[in-house]
Image (spheres, helix red, strand yellow):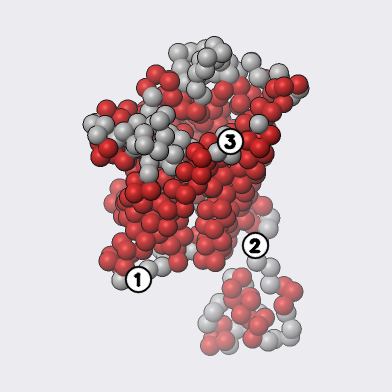
């Protein structure tokens, strides 16, 4: 018992690390003038959702069902009452573990609206979305009924769609929300005509590495014990992610003629997303297949925003929504009870199309609910307090406008009129790069 609790607590810490990892992953992909804002949006989600989770979020997600599989009893564990003493104390490991899922799901959405959202409005959105969307959906997907009389959510217990670690509740949920919010806020000024390249690719790769590291807690920790099921989820997470990198890079090579570091990092995340719902329901061949398919399909899907005209800044839709759908649906093909008797046989293992149908209904329900609810929440914030920064702040830099800070400060490197000073001022936007040719002095 103690060993299982230790593993769940360790996994919870690994999942928490994923949100700072996501901050670096996203932060490296934005422009220099908005990197701090992106980091703050991720850390802001940690703060807001962490408070809501222990006050009422856990109860709404995992309290006894009160509405036919839609919502838990918000009063049952209010302030974690009944969970902080005696024999119940070990249950707080599960509370902590699931709280980290809530945090990163909200943070994922931030990438879709990079460069243009007011920080205060984002915090309000995070609170409302977690309360009205994530906590109920977590109840649907993660809250299982048991023999002691507890009644859980409809997707887990009535539909019996499989989602081991969050393909629907986390990735489809966040991806659909990202699409809705990108539409509500509108396009960045200058997109897609102006180049908006990542300002720091080493940050992106560091973030991807931290996400991959933490994701072993995300997936293997969902076994809720130090057991063989955790080992299965762990090795499938490794295999699928490696295959996804190769799948993404292959598409890049065939389409663009180059295999890029941004593509490799994106392939990591695509593979992790794709294997998340399936990691304990497929064998190694299924994991490899899901990984390479997720990597290739997501590499193609990131171009959808140009075709349909929605500005998903950092490809949350193309990676998380599409990758989540791929992984969730492919359980219906590659699932096998040979590795987990609590799973189901998919089409390729003699199970027919039954499980695929269940997977599609679960994924579709979460997608539709999140899309509509997010659009309503985002629109109400937009017309009341305002969601988007003004044009001047967006053009000159959202970091300065929202946080009165700059990610890169060069004042300390001045030494007369040296080339280093001029180069630093040029990078900071103080001196035009052609100033020497024009005879301009700072």
> Which SS class for mark 1?
loop
Q: Residue at x 37, y 44 (%)?
A: 283
193 up-or-down from 403: above or below: below
Is residue 438 visible to us here? yes
Tell me which corner region of the image, top left, top right, bottom left or bottom right, holds residue 121: top right
Label 1 crowd bin: few (<14), some (14–19), many (20+), radius 10 Å: few
**Cα separation between marks 1 and 3:** 42 Å
Q: Residue at x 57, y 44 (%)?
A: 217
Q: Are marks 1 and 3 in contact (CB under 8 Å)?
A: no
Is residue 121 visible to us here? no
Residue under label 1, please give it: 258
Quadrant location, the C terminus:
bottom right
> Which SS class for mark 3?
loop
Q: Residue at x 60, y 84 (%)?
A: 440
Q: Residue at x 46, y 24 (%)?
A: 140
Q: Say how many tags the image has.
A: 3
Tell me which corner region of the image, top left, top right, bottom left or bottom right, holds residue 320: top left
Residue under label 2, please give it: 407
The image position of residue 164, as x and y in percent, is: 46, 35
**Cα separation between marks 1 and 2:** 30 Å
Taking depth in this image into account, of 234 and 55 the one nearest to the observer is 234
Q: Are marks 1 and 2 in contact (CB under 8 Å)?
A: no
Residue under label 3, please give it: 225
- Horizontal arrangement in the rendering, residue 41 relative to residue 174 (left or right): right
Taking depth in this image into account, of 150 and 104 the one nearest to the observer is 150
Taking depth in this image into account, of 409 and 356 the one nearest to the observer is 356
């Amino acid at each position: 018992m103690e060993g299982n609790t230790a593993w769940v607590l360790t996994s919870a810490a690994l999942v928490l690390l994923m949100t700072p990892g996501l901050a670096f992953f996203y932060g490296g992909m934005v422009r220099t003038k908005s990197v701090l804002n992106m980091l703050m949006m991720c850390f802001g989600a940690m703060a807001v959702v962490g408070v809501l989770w222990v006050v009422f979020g856990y109860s709404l997600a995992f309290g006894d069902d009160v509405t036919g599989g839609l919502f838990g009893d918000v009063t049952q564990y209010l302030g974690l009452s009944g969970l902080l003493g005696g024999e119940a104390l070990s249950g707080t490991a599960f509370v902590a573990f699931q709280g980290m899922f809530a945090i990163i799901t909200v943070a994922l959405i931030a990438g879709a609206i990079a460069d243009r959202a007011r920080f205060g409005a984002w915090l309000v959105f995070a609170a409302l979305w977690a309360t009205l969307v994530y906590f109920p959906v977590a109840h649907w997907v993660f809250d299982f009924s048991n023999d002691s009389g507890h009644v859980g959510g409809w997707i887990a217990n009535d539909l019996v769609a499989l989602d081991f670690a969050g393909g629907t509740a986390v990735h489809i949920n966040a991806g659909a929300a990202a699409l809705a919010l990108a539409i509500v806020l509108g396009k960045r000024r200058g997109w897609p005509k102006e180049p908006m390249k990542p300002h720091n690719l080493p940050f992106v790769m560091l973030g991807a590495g931290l996400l991959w590291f933490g994701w072993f807690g995300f997936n293997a920790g969902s076994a809720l014990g130090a057991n063989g099921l955790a080992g299965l989820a762990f090795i499938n997470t490794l295999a699928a992610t490696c295959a996804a990198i190769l799948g993404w890079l292959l598409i890049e090579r065939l389409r663009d003629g180059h295999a890029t570091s941004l593509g490799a990092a994106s392939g990591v995340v695509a593979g992790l997303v794709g294997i998340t719902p399936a990691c304990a329901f497929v064998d190694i061949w299924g994991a490899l297949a899901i990984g390479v398919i997720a990597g290739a399909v997501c590499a193609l899907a990131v171009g959808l925003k140009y075709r349909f005209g929605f500005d998903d800044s950092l490809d949350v839709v193309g990676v998380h929504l599409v990758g989540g759908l791929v992984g969730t649906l492919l359980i219906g093909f590659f699932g096998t009870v040979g590795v987990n008797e609590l799973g189901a046989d998919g089409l390729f293992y003699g199970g027919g199309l039954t499980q695929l149908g269940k997977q599609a209904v679960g994924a579709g329900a979460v997608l539709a609910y999140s899309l509509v609810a997010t659009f309503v929440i985002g629109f109400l914030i937009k017309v009341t307090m305002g969601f988007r920064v003004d044009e001047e702040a967006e053009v000159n830099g959202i970091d300065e406008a929202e946080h009165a800070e700059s990610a890169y400060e060069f004042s300390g490197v001045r030494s007369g009129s040296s080339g280093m000073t001029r180069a630093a001022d040029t990078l900071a936007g103080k001196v035009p790069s052609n100033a020497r040719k024009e005879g301009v002095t700072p």
